[in-house]
Image (cartoon, grey):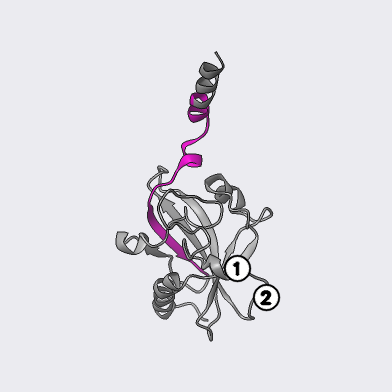
Amino acid sequence: MKKILAVAFIISLFLIVPSRFLAKGATTKIMIEGADLAKPIEITDRKVLSNFQVWTGPGTFSTQPGFNANGPGFIINWSQGEVTQLPQALRRYQVSFYSDDLPNDRAIYVVFYAVSPGSEHGYVYLPGKSDEWYRLNVSSIARGVEGKWFHAWSIWESIARPLIKKARANSTDPV
């Protein structure tokens, strides 16, 4: 009888819990927005997107051999740890991630990416409890490191920086 109740409970959880809590699909689009950009940058190239999975890093797990939750992944170099002091004069961009798991083209995760014009290193902020995107993010994945800044992953930098530089060059807004 206990086995039947346990199975019934598990099945009911799958029926009650929204599918976004269980979502682990591929990233289908990344949107970068900033005040110094004339229009948002959309990244939709599947080959590029395959590098940036929301479902990697702290708070995640995998059965794949060699998986390291603290290795570079998502858009963060997790192995460098938290950044406690940021450089001055950073340009900040909102980066939204989309997945085929949610209908209607809604973001599944949102972070902030900041770059210093004179530096090669960028930073990523995971919204904390008092931030606008916190609830959305933790409904997708609770990492346990929300509200902190981290070093951006070099692979992300090699994609995002040239796109931002090009979009800023095409912008008519004064810098």
Element under disc 1:
loop
Task: Give the residue drawn at x 61%, y 52%.
Answer: 134
* Viewer-proximal residue among 136 and 84: 84
Whether residue 43 is situated above or below residue 116 in the rendered picture? above
| 27 magenta-colored | yes
* Viewer-proximal residue among 53 and 1: 1
Q: Which mark is residue 81?
A: 1
| 141 magenta-colored | no
- In percent of width and height, residue 121 lies at 52, 78
Contact check, label 1 and label 2, Cβ < 8 Å: no
Q: CA distance from mark 1 to mark 2?
A: 12 Å
Give the side of residue 8 with respect to residue 39, left or right: right
Whether residue 134 is situated above or below residue 15 in the rendered picture? below
Give, as a single range, the part of the protein colored magenta: 11-34
Q: Which mark is residue 138?
A: none
Element under disc 2:
loop
Q: In the image, what residue type sits under mark 1?
A: Gly
- In percent of width and height, residue 120 lies at 50, 82
Task: Give the residue drawn at x 53%, y 62%.
Answer: 70
- Furthest residue to the top? 1
Tell me the quarter of the image containing the N terminus: top right
* Viewer-proximal residue among 122 and 58: 58
Give the side of residue 81 with respect to residue 96, left or right: right
Task: Give the residue drawn at x 56%, y 45%.
Answer: 139
- In percent of width and height, residue 95 lies at 49, 62
Residue under label 2: 85
Q: In the image, what residue type sits under mark 2?
A: Gln
